[in-house]
Image: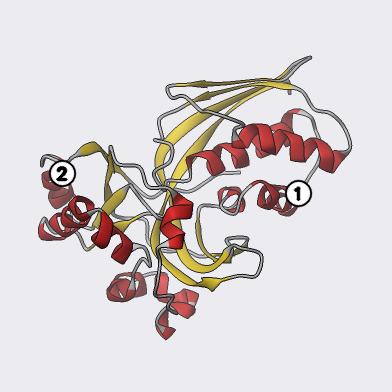
Amino acid sequence: MDKISLQSPAKINLFLFILGRREDGYHNIYSLVQVVDLVDTVEIERSDRTEIEFIGTKISGESTIHKALKKLSEYVGEKLSAKIVVRKRIPAGAGLGSGSSNAAIALYGLNKIFNLGLSLEQLREIGASVGSDVPLFLTHGSAIISGRGEIIKEVNPPLDYSVVLIVPKIRIDTKWAYSNVTNYHQPPEELLDEKSVEGDSFWQSLSNFDNSFIQVIRNNFPSIAKDIDRLKSFGADYASITGSGSAYFGIFRDSTKALNALMEKWDGNTYLVRPAKIIL
């Protein structure tokens, strides 16, 4: 195999609890993460020299794919060269995991075209050295993550709902957002059992879902907080930000209510998406 084309999905954090700051400067988290069917396309081809191109958005500095290729080369002890073209649909810098997803899917594709024979567990290990969210995208796409994001427990929540996703023009710096979280808190005891987010229990557990960044958003970006409340008023079963923002979303069991919410005026780009599976 000399060439491969793969889909690279976005993610949303259905809940996100920041437990505290670690000695290494990262934070311990506890989060339920779900990939959705908003995807980039990653095309990888063997080449004599490395070329990485992004179509649809501008990526400044060293991309996560550059880092992933470098870490993979170091891991196998061989300089790997490839032409990689990423056709972007996922907005960058909005809490949707765009760069992490691209890096993970690139690792998976490079493993295939170079016949490296690495397991998913090995690819996740390499991915964790690129970024905390990268290993998630080397699972089937529904997981509770903890530690700094590298500890992954795959779960099977329901996927029969719609997501109204809104990406405002506002961008929120992740480091700034973490520095402004003042109240670390543990998740409710119920959510520590992964069965609480599977089957019908998922819907019963929604009242316990939360995001530790919400207060930061309410204090500093009231327009986003107001729109999250609007999503609830249109019938969202749950609404929040993803990651530290700035993207926010509402999940709807009723597709008609989702369509009605989508038709409203929002200050940003809107998407109607659904939860998805990653096929590896």
Give the left or right position of residue 143, taking residue 79 as reference: left
Amino acid type for the residue under numbered disc 2: Leu
- Camera-side residue: 139 or 99? 99
Q: Residue at x 11, y 39 (%)?
A: 265
The earlier-in-sequence mark between 1 and 2 is: 1
Q: Amino acid at mark 1?
A: Ser
The tally of labels here is 2
Q: 89 or 24: nearer the eye? A: 24
Q: Estimate the x, y position of residue 232 in percent, counting from the top left.
A: 16, 60
Expressed as whole percent of the image width and height from the top left, the position of residue 89 reads 40, 30
Could you say which quadrant of the image residue 272 lies in?
top left
Q: Residue at x 37, y 47 (%)?
A: 172
- Asked whether residue 247 appears in the rendered view, the answer is yes
Residue 244 in the figure: left or right of residue 193: left
Distance from Cα at disc 1 to Cα at disc 2:
41 Å
Residue, far top: 48
Residue that badge 2 annotates: 259
Residue pointed to by mark 1: 119
- At mark 1, the secondary structure is loop
**Label 1–label 2 contact, CB within 8 A:** no
Residue 239 in sight here: no
At label 1, counting other C-alpha atoms closer than 10 Å, the crowd grade (few under 14, some 14-19, many 20 or more) is few
